Amino acid sequence: MRRFLGLDSKGGLPPGTAIYVGKTRGKEPRIERIVYDQDDAAYDDEIPLDECMPVPESDQVVWYNVVGLENVGVIEQLGKRFGLHPLWVEDIVQTGQRPKVEHGDGLYVVVRMFSLDEKGKGVMSEQVSLCLRGPVLLSFQERDGDVFGAVRQRIRSGKGQVRRMGPDYLLYALLDAIVDGYFVVLEHLGEEVEQLEEEVIEHPDSETVRSIHTMRRQVSHLRHSVFPLRDMIYVLDRPGESLISDSVSPYWRDLQDHVLRVGEALENMRDWVGSLFDTYLSVASQRMNEVMKVLTVIATLFIPLTFIAGIYGMNFKYMPELEWRWGYPVFLLVMGCLLVAMLTFFKRRDWL
């Protein structure tokens, strides 16, 4: 039986106990490092744990991106090296967290990252944890593949504001990339809903119902992941927040506007998907009515014919028409005329 939240293995354990709860298996952590300042940037695709230093030189910003969470021991060592709270480490490897932000000796942010698979047809979802500790930002994700490619490219090329700003702007840039990924997924889901709508109207079947329910679950999952972001970004942009500089505040407000737009689009899509099921029921009911109408007309046409055939199918000896030479063709003609008359009547009443 599939576990609902994957928390049954944590029962009775003390707070801060890190146990990996996720779907990705057999993936050893890979640590990616980007060190940059206004003048230069250095990128390492994979470094050993021993090279992860908590304090960079001069005024450089360091971004550690950890891919793979199953080896909890590595995550705990990173937490000790950078002074992450044990509860943060616990939430990092417990990948069913609700989007949230926590303050302490740094910032801890949890969001859901949505993206399209390699074929561009399915939607993938995973938890991303972001820890801001002074000039160091750590990000944790379950598997390879993310939406941070544009941020990495801007850091390498020196384009945009990221190289001239601090780690708080890098935190904003990563969150902005995640939210921009929502728009890509929403556009993809919108195209699928349009196809479903055509399918519902043209040729609905049981597979259409399953597709509608699958789409409804995807939209609901997106909605539950997006709506907490509004409050989370408001908390991050709260006046007096020491880790977020005033120069970055306008960008947070712009990000909050993007989140509101995503939320509105999800609300519209949820209503749209909900109306698809109502449309399916209406179309199915209409088609059933058409079938019943045809069957009713056929049954009505044969009622008088069956009545006539029933009368002359009785085995009474004294029925004068039975010995009449023209009885058979005459009664066939009568039945045919009756059939034509009834069809004409139905046609004039627009029953056909």
Image: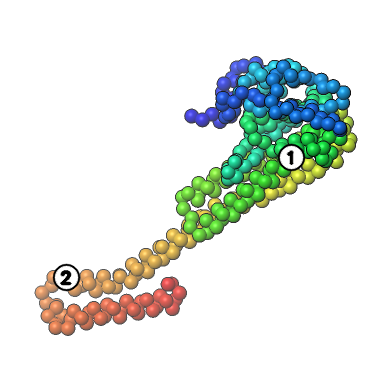
Residue farthest to the left?
A: 317
State the image coordinates of residue 311 (x, y, percent, origin top left). Answer: 21, 72
Name the residue: 22% across, 79% down.
Answer: 331
Q: What kind of residue is marked 2?
A: Met
Q: Is residue 38 left or right of residue 230?
A: right
What residue sits right under mark 1 in the picture? Answer: 150
Quadrant that contains the C terminus:
bottom left
Which of the two labelled residues, at mark 1 and mark 2, occupies the earlier sequence position?
Answer: 1
Q: Secondary structure at mark 2?
A: loop
Name the residue: 69% across, 38% down.
Answer: 147
Residue 309 seen in this snapshot: yes
Residue nearest the viewer, comparing 309 with 130: 130
Residue 227 seen in this snapshot: no
Distance Cα–Cα, label 1 vs label 2 = 89 Å
Q: Are marks 1 and 2 in contact (CB under 8 Å)?
A: no
State the image coordinates of residue 312 (x, y, percent, origin top left). Answer: 19, 73
How many neighbours does mark 1 have within 10 angstroms: few (below 14), some (14-19), or many (20 or more)? Answer: few
Residue nearest the viewer, comparing 107 with 55: 55
Residue 180 occupies quadrant: top right
Q: Secondary structure at mark 1?
A: helix
Q: What kind of residue is marked 1?
A: Ala
Name the residue: 72% across, 41% down.
Answer: 179
- Asked if residue 138 is positioned above or below residue 224 in the image, the reply reads above
Total of numbered circles in the picture? 2
- Asked if residue 120 is positioned above or below residue 198 in the image, the reply reads above
- Asked if residue 147 is positioned above or below residue 308 in the image, the reply reads above
- Asked if residue 270 is positioned above or below residue 300 in the image, the reply reads above
Residue nearest the viewer, comparing 247 with 4: 247
What residue sits right under mark 2 in the picture? Answer: 314
State the image coordinates of residue 321 (x, y, percent, origin top left). Answer: 16, 80
